Amino acid sequence: MTAIAIDGPSGAGKSTLARRLAAWLGYIYVDTGAMYRTVGLYAVENGVNPKQEDAVTALLPNIKIHLAYQDGAQHVFLNDEDVSNRIRTEQISMAASDVSALSSVRAFLLETQRSLARENNVLMDGRDIGTVILPNAQIKIFLTASPEERARRRYEELLARGETVCYETVLEDVRQRDDQDTNRALSPLKPAEDAVVVDTTGFSFEQAFERLQQIIKERL
Ligand code: DC
């Protein structure tokens, strides 16, 4: 099996690029952020503070997450309910970042992620895929862009979805999540030593896509 790991901060364009690259390669796309979001959603909907390790840990046995693919798009199921859209709000983004700092949650998701890579050719995106989950991945890419550019992309995505948002708030959220994800003790966001770092600031989607295709072609 072949595994390609794409890590990087939120808003660097990972998921759109990873989805398109997986379709090009014929690999399964695994969006691991969606799994953390699902745990965050379950905590919030059950009135549990996503920062409280004991309370969140107690919920884990009630959570069953599975991924399914419909027309090439990944759908995330929480206890058999499709939550793919509900996990995409700003509130759940922050809850996902909170629960992702808890060791019980990381351990809970680790095996699911590894087993997907044992059974399929995967292109997996996240924060710790190249460093922790799949240290033997054949190709590791660390995708980044400036916080302002990532906030602008996120802002436009939210506007397009009809949400009322303010750019400054989105930028503040991006910085706060970067800070939390980079400075946490467990599996912090950082490039693997053998990752190719790609900064997409100022790149169009097509330019970034072509750059990644080129990196993959050279290494496969
Ligand atoms: O990629 P995303 O924005 O959907 O991820 C949501 C949160 O989950 C993000 O704040 C960091 C966390 N995460 C993580 O800790 N490890 C991963 N492999 C993927 C996401």
Image: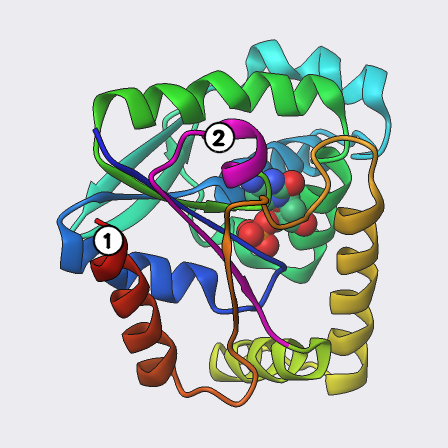
Q: Is residue 62 left or right of residue 218?
A: right
Q: Residue 189 location, x and y as percent?
A: 68, 47
Q: Residue 128 location, x and y as percent?
A: 58, 39
Q: Secondary structure at mark 2?
A: loop
Q: Is residue 46 left or right of residue 24?
A: right
Give residue 92's mark.
Answer: none
Q: Are marks 2 and 1 in contact (CB under 8 Å)?
A: no
Q: Which residue is at 48% across, 30% downward?
A: 135
Q: Is residue 65 left or right of residue 120?
A: right
Give residue 135's mark.
Answer: 2
Quick one: label 2 or label 1, which is nearer the N terminus?
1
**For the magenta stretch, what is the residue range?**
129-145
Q: Quadrant of residue 117?
A: top left
Look at the image and tell me in which quarter the N terminus lies: top left
Give the residue pinned by disc 1: 22
Does the magenta portion include 130?
A: yes
Q: Is residue 133 above or below residue 96?
A: above
Q: Is residue 97 above or below residue 10?
A: above
Q: Amino acid at mark 2?
A: Pro
- Observer able to see residue 79: no
Q: Secondary structure at mark 1?
A: helix
Q: Amino acid at mark 1?
A: Ala
Q: Nearer the viewer, residue 186 or 61?
A: 186
Q: Quadrant of residue 163?
A: bottom right
Q: Is residue 152 above or below residue 33?
A: below
Which is more foreground, mark 2 or mark 1?
Answer: 2
Q: Is residue 106 left or right of residue 113?
A: right
Q: Which residue is at 64% across, 25% downward?
A: 106
How far, Cα to Cα, is label 2 from label 1?
19 Å
Q: Residue 53 location, x and y as percent?
A: 83, 21
- Observer able to see residue 39: yes
